[in-house]
Each structure stands twice: as structure tokens, then as C-alpha cells.
Image: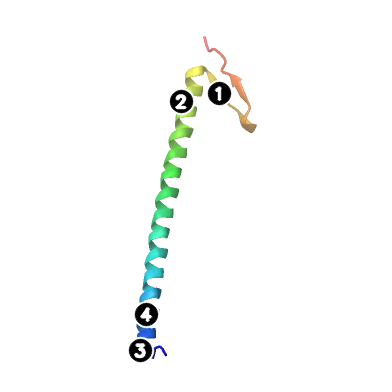
Amino acid sequence: VVCPVLKLVADSRVQTLLQQMQDKFQTMSDQIIGRNILFTNDLEKNIADLMTQAGVEELEGENKTPATNKS
């Protein structure tokens, strides 16, 4: 036979532990998503810089063509 008071205390501790775990996982998830966004932004900028250096312009529809030489 389990004492009702001890069961309530154990249930409360389990609930608290589960909430703490959920909070920690949410924080970690937010950090990972934030890092991925920063990584993607940096990658897009680096690609754009490389395209500019290579003389490629971005057109509608994501078609890439050599930039025209302006004399």
C-alpha cells in the first residue's frame, strides 16, 4: 500500500522534472534553429559574394548568366 501523501510528492517531483526537461529541450531547439538561421544567412551571403566575383548576375527565376561587361 502506497501512502497517498508520498504518491502526491512523487507525482509532483516527476511533473517538475518533466517540465524542466521540456524547458531544456525547448531552449536547445531554439538555439539550434538560431544557429541554423545564422549559418544559412552567412552561406547565402558568401554565395552571393562568390557569384559577384565570378561575374554572374542573379535574374528572375534563379537563372544564372554571365554579367555583361560594361565598357
Q: Which-is-in-front pick, marks 4 and 1?
A: 4
Amino acid carrying label 2: it is: Asp
Query: Between marks 2 and 1, how big is the CA–CA gap?
Result: 11 Å
Taking the image as shown, residue 60 lies to the left or right of residue 52, namely right
How far is the residue under mark 3 from the one under mark 1? 72 Å
Q: Residue at x 37, y 90 (%)?
A: 3
Image quarter of residue 63: top right
Q: Residue at x 37, y 66 (%)?
A: 20
The residue identified by callout 1 is: 57
- Badge 3 is on which residue? 5
Q: Residues within 10 Å of mark 3 (few under 14, many from 20)?
A: few
Q: Amino acid at mark 4?
A: Ala
Q: How far, Cα to Cα, is label 3 from label 4?
A: 9 Å
Q: Which residue is mark 4?
A: 10
Amino acid type shown at disc 3: Val
Q: Height in image: 32 above or below 52?
A: below
C-alpha distance separating marks 4 and 1:
64 Å
Q: Position of residue 56 (x, y in %)?
A: 55, 20
Mark 3 lies on a secondary structure that is: helix
From the viewer's side, name the closer residue of 65 and 1. 1
For the residues labelled 3 and 4, say whether their Cβ atoms are less than 8 Å apart. no
Q: Secondary structure at mark 1?
A: strand
Which residue is identified by label 2?
49
The amino acid beneath tag 1 is Glu
For mark 1, does the 10 Å Cα neighbourhood hold few (<14), some (14 to 19), or many (20 or more) residues?
some
Report crowding for label 2: few under 14, some 14 to 19, many 20 or more residues within 10 A (C-alpha): few
Q: Earlier in the sequence, mark 2 or mark 4?
A: 4
